[in-house]
Amino acid sequence: MSEQFTEEEVRILKKICENPIFKQLKPLHVQKRISLYSLLVDICNHYDIDEQQFYSKRREKFIVKARQEFVHHAYKIRKRSVTEIAKTMKKDYSTVSWYLKKPSPETDKLLKTLSESGE
């Protein structure tokens, strides 16, 4: 179905587009809701750890950093609730709150670039 519009059809479409009703409408902004699990996998890949290390009780620096970035990204950028983040991490609410109190330079840098680009 690769048919061309005729000149008459193009003229009609242009008239429709010039209608003030269509000019006042703003485009719909649909936010893609990606699961927190897929974010967790991305963070694990970025920090070169596996999911078992992420869920473990170990507190090595690179694991804590990965968890911290996950919490900040999920909360600040994906706008997810603390309880939803805690369920995904298999941790309790207070752990997520503790991570949110700590600064996260990578997520803050990403937020700054997003705000400067006008998103």
Image (cartoon, rainbow, N blue to C red):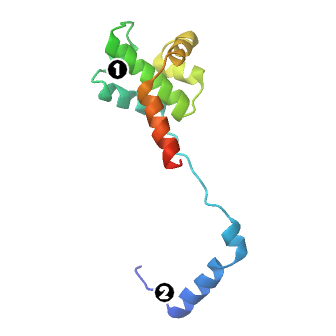
**Disc ID at residue 51:** 1
* Picture coordinates of residue 91, whole percent (x, y): 50, 12
User: Left of 69 or right of it: where is 45?
Assistant: left
**Residue shown at 67%/71% (left/top)?**
22
Picture layout, residue 61 above or below residue 71: above
* Numbered disc 2: secondary structure: loop
* Picture coordinates of residue 19, whole percent (x, y): 69, 78
Amino acid type for the residue under numbered disc 2: Phe
**Can you say which quadrant of the picture contains the N terminus?**
bottom left
Marks 2 and 1 in Cβ contact (< 8 Å): no
**Residue shown at 32%/16% (left/top)?**
62
Q: Determine the image quadrant of residue 40.
A: top left
* Picture coordinates of residue 27, whole percent (x, y): 61, 60
* Picture coordinates of residue 113, whole percent (x, y): 46, 41
Residue ID for mark 2: 5
Q: Residues within 10 Å of mark 1 (few under 14, many from 20)?
A: some
**Residue shown at 57%/10% (left/top)?**
94
Amino acid type for the residue under numbered disc 1: Glu
**Disc ID at residue 113:** none
Which residue is most to the left? 48
Picture layout, residue 5 above or below residue 56: below
* Numbered disc 1: secondary structure: helix
Q: Residues within 10 Å of mark 2 (few under 14, many from 20)?
A: few
The answer to whether one can see residue 37 in this image is no
User: Left of 62 or right of it: where is 69?
Assistant: right
Q: Who is closer to the viewer here, 30 or 35?
A: 30
Picture layout, residue 22 above or below residue 90: below
Q: Alpha carbon of mark 2 to alpha carbon of mark 1: how far?
A: 53 Å
